[in-house]
Amino acid sequence: MNPTDHQHLIDELDTLLARIATLLQGFESTGCNLSMKADYIALHELQARALKQRQEHAHAMGDDRSQSVLATIEGLH
């Protein structure tokens, strides 16, 4: 995979992460995080997986900061 491919995937993951953040905010603002707890947790799990994939692609491109961020993400779960 070349740097352009990695960057394309990072951009797509950034879009996905923004959409997930919007969904999470919607859940929280409407109280659905309480009534639909399993779905709310699933969104957080999806967010964590997308963040991990994003960091893996950043690392593959030589971004040294990605390892510390990835360690932080893994520490949250």
Image: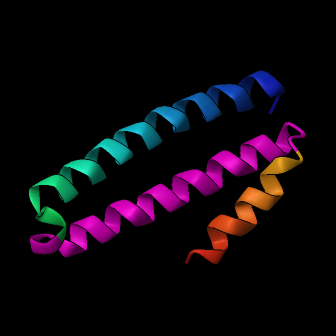
- What residue lies at 16% left-to-right and 53% top-to-bottom? 29
Residue 48 is one of the magenta-drawn residues? yes
Residue 44 picture location, percent across and down: 39, 63
* Image position of 60 with respect to 51: above or below: above
Q: Residue at x 26, y 66 (%)?
A: 40
Residue 74 shown in magenta: no
Left/right placement of residue 5 relative to residue 12 reads right
Residue 77, above or below 44: below
x and y, in percent, of residue 3 in the image: 82, 27
**x, y percent for residue 22:** 30, 42
Q: Furthest-front residue in view? A: 29
**Depth check, front residue: 22 or 57:** 22
Quadrant of the rendered image containing residue 18: top left
Q: Main secondary structure of the magenta part?
A: helix
What residue is at 27 percent from the left and 50 percent from the top?
Answer: 25
- Left/right placement of residue 28 relative to residue 54 reads left
